[in-house]
Amino acid sequence: MLSVLSVSAGVAAQQQAPSGDELRAMYCVEVIRAEIVLQRHLISASDAAAASAVTPTLRQQWIDTSAELLQGLAKLEVVRYKLQAYMLPRIPALDSLALATAMRQGDADFQESKDAADRCSTECSAAQATNQQVVCSASCGDKGPLGRISACDKPTWLPP
């Protein structure tokens, strides 16, 4: 039993605290993963809408939407690859608890942002005039998580 504890203590002592960039990368890995899941869901819904469209014009609009969503998905997958390529060699040497905490925060911020967007969409759709909808959308929700999440789409802070 004592040897197991000393081995565990040795492993914990070898792990170092992650840097700010490493924590941000793990946060963003989770955010991008959630965005990819959402994007795939939207693509599926768009494809289904195209298949059931009643007019050729409407069908084409849904096909165009699917094409845009696929382009967005491809960009997200490139970002995820870059983040993973940056982090994979580093993970064994880093404090796994700190990395897991960053990932949980990324998931929580994504969910909070998604919930806020859904709530704002419902609230702002009640505004009849276009100007009111724009004002409502601009003022609705907490911008904190959205700003952190948005920074993940273009991680310019990652080394080349």
Image (cartoon, rainbow, N blue to C red):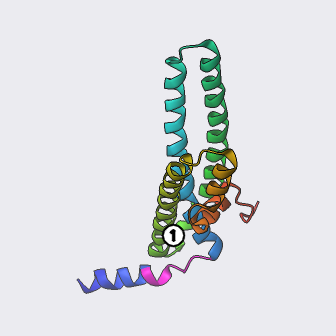
- Tell which of 43 and 55 is nearer to you: 55
Say which element carries label 1. Answer: helix
67 in relation to 114, above or below: above
State which quadrant residue 160 falls in. bottom right
Give coordinates of residue 13: x percent, y percent.
46, 84
State which quadrant residue 139 falls in. bottom right
Asked whether residue 17 is drawn in magenta, I would say: yes
- Tell which of 16 and 153 is nearer to you: 153
Q: Is residue 8 left or right of residue 134?
A: left
Neighbor class of circle 1 (other Cα within 10 Å; few <14, some 14-19, many 20+) is: many
Would you say the magenta stretch is mainly helix, strand or loop? loop
Residue range corresponding to the magenta coloring: 12-19
Q: Quadrant of the N terminus?
A: bottom left
Asked whether residue 45 is drawn in magenta, I would say: no
x 62%, y 36%: residue: 69
Q: Is residue 90 left or right of residue 153?
A: left
- Tell which of 138 and 69 is nearer to you: 138
- Tell which of 68 and 116 is nearer to you: 116
Mark 1 — residue?
Answer: 102
State which quadrant residue 16 falls in. bottom right
- Amino acid type at image mark 1: Ala
Give coordinates of residue 73: x percent, y percent.
61, 40
Give coordinates of residue 123: x percent, y percent.
51, 53
